[in-house]
Amino acid sequence: MTRALEGITVLDLSRYVAGPYCTQMLGDFGADVIKIEKPDGGDPMRGDGAATGDDKLYMLMYNRNKRSLTLNLRHESGREILASLIQGADVLVENFRPGTMEAMGFGWEAISALNPAMVMARISGFGQDGPWAKRPAFDAIAQAEGGLMHLTGSENGEATMMGAIMIDYSTGTNAALGVLAALHARERTGRGQVVDVPLLDTAMSFLMTAVAEYQRDSVVMGRMGNRDRYSAPTNTYPTRDGKRLHLMAAGQKHFEALVEIMGEGKIHDNPAFASPADRLENADLVDETVAGWFARHDQDWLYERLVAAEVPCARLATVAEVVENPQVKHRGQIIEVEHPNLGTVSLQGNPIRLTDTPVETHRAVPTLGQHTDEILAELLDFDADAIAELRRDGVI
Amino acid sequence: MTRALEGITVLDLSRYVAGPYCTQMLGDFGADVIKIEKPDGGDPMRGDGAATGDDKLYMLMYNRNKRSLTLNLRHESGREILASLIQGADVLVENFRPGTMEAMGFGWEAISALNPAMVMARISGFGQDGPWAKRPAFDAIAQAEGGLMHLTGSENGEATMMGAIMIDYSTGTNAALGVLAALHARERTGRGQVVDVPLLDTAMSFLMTAVAEYQRDSVVMGRMGNRDRYSAPTNTYPTRDGKRLHLMAAGQKHFEALVEIMGEGKIHDNPAFASPADRLENADLVDETVAGWFARHDQDWLYERLVAAEVPCARLATVAEVVENPQVKHRGQIIEVEHPNLGTVSLQGNPIRLTDTPVETHRAVPTLGQHTDEILAELLDFDADAIAELRRDGVI
């Protein structure tokens, strides 16, 4: 079985989430990802998160399909080894604070001199240049400064963080996308280039029409709770049994199917409900009417009928319900990854399905330095004595 | 200036957000994206959203760098033209309900027979197969059924929708990533393939450690408000002047810098504050202590000092503050797109920066059918008479 990115070698100097998620994507597609870690402790994520064993669950999410090489970049020999690896690789991914690679002697000029065909992906909080370039950042900092936290939460409530680290993930995906575009360009030009992807720019990219509305009309987009900004009825409604369902019945076909189930024909006579534009204009009244009907029925009863009538609706699923979802089971989206210390761990799988070169877990999450000897022998022709010496000197 | 995906032709049959965002990414990288729209009204998004002119703002977010071709696929001649275009293209992107392409005679078998090298990206709510395959879905449906809404909101409050259509965007990016991986594979195999990317699988992919924690330990991950799941202090705190700041000072270096600014040396003597693990265990006490200090100072005073000390912190910026952010200005992340009817509109730019083949807006958002004649003449050698006849017959 061939893999999509077979033959591509990725040097992964990144830590935490966004960088490792980027390289896991490349590894899922079949690239040979070499995770380069400092010998004392490696990726700091090895020590974070829900602890069960000597490696941690958080680490497991972002590091399948990689090999681990320890390398001390504060040691001259460590930097020499990195330089040699750069000469034979296709992609380098890093998410140090801007300036760090330069301080180690591996700025773009140096890397490009070693290997003009190298694609260098640089993930950062705010980008490689500019007044904020060196500020530290995490997912939530980008959510907040990027304007997304302000948009999340109820209309009269407070700005709310999204409950998942959406910007870390998305920045990683954007970086992977930039890497593949750069590899495509390289086939024509023969040259590599820098792919510069910041958390802030990624967060901003999700602002929908907010920038345009502000610049044209001086409208500052606000929070809407669970109501859709552009249509009605689209909201989360409580049900008689104290649960909630999310409904999206704004389009004419869906709204008419909803009214049919509601059995309240008089809605058709009300001009406030006539068209999508009318319903959006009268969203409060529409919401009130639908909410009244939901409140008279149990969640199961409503869900079954709405689904049967093909009206878009959803349970606010917990992870337990996600795992039990028949569609998730059918699609095999819960995968198992083997780990030498933790045994078999279940995870959500890659969301991208390629039919001819399928994504698969061909490598378990590596322990720190698990592949050091193998990589040095295979890629740089080091013999056992040389490797033993490097280990004695604290280089690996 | 060369572009990364120069020479790649994309047939874009998609509507709404996820599909058009996917193809806009490919267009930003320089592919020739042909947006194929039905002659009567085209992409339904042309009529949705904040209305200012005869095309709408929402449409503008996802359709730069494309050409528009009208084509009536209910007409035999329309299907013949699509078949001819397929023979000369590299990528086809669609987000119809599963089964629709098959019903039109353009299932994968048919497309692959016309052009074995075609990459076909299929974006859907729940995937091309399985018991939920034909259910209608939108972004919020996937947020809800995918477990993300349950994770967003305050600990004792209700499950909350993320305030931006994160899953539509991310599914589009995932599809673009899958397309580029498939194009890479094609160089070795000569074959195209299907890229199947559902909203649900994309939503699930963001569940962090939730699946693993549930399967191993039967823990159902819940909501945490603005507090980080894995560290403290990381939360949004009110300031004396009635504003709020988001702080992430959990790491040892950042926490010590925070304590230094707080000037409360006695914190160092408290074992509850000693290590990241101690602080996470005592997160309530840590939060209370930090909140007390924030409440005694104004937002500007705090922000200035924390930024100077390199402690990660953020304002909960509105779009007005995002647009005025000096880093955003320096990086030029607000771009302008020309539209024949609306004039110049400001938008957030592409978050992926390629230094050698930069992303640029080389085409404004097209009006419906703006490039129909040009495309038919250029790609299929139709002369003016043939085009006039197609128009007369309602094919274009």
Image: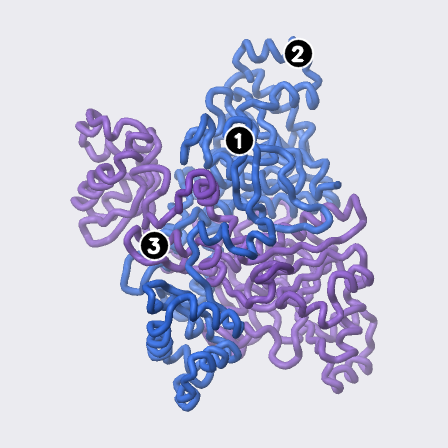
Chain colours: A purple, B blue
- Judged from the image, the secondary structure of the residue bearing numbered disc 3 is loop
Residue placed most toward the observer, B203 or B228: B228
User: What residue does disc 2 label?
Assistant: B384
Q: Position of residue B16 (x, y in %)?
A: 47, 36
User: What residue does disc 1 label?
Assistant: B343
Asked which quadrant contains residue B52, the reply is: top left
Q: CA distance from mark 3 to mark 1?
A: 33 Å
Residue A132's place in the image compared with A216, above or below, is below
Residue A298's place in the image compared with B242, above or below, is above
For label 1, the crowd category at 10 Å Cα-Cα, with few meaning under 14, some 14 to 19 and many 20 or more, is few
Disc 1 marks a residue whose amino acid type is Gly
Disc 2 marks a residue whose amino acid type is Ala
Q: Is residue B152 left or right of residue B117?
A: left
Q: CA distance from mark 2 to mark 3?
A: 55 Å
Which quadrant of the rendered structure holds the C terminus of chain B? Answer: top right
Asked whether the beta carbons under mark 3 and mark 1 sit within 8 Å of each other, the answer is no
User: What residue does disc 3 label?
Assistant: A153
Residue A75 appears in view: yes
Q: Determine the residue positioned at 21% across, 35% down.
A: A262
Of labels 2 and 1, the one closer to you: 1
- Judged from the image, the secondary structure of the residue bearing numbered disc 2 is helix
Q: Determine the residue positioned at 67% across, 54% down.
A: A195
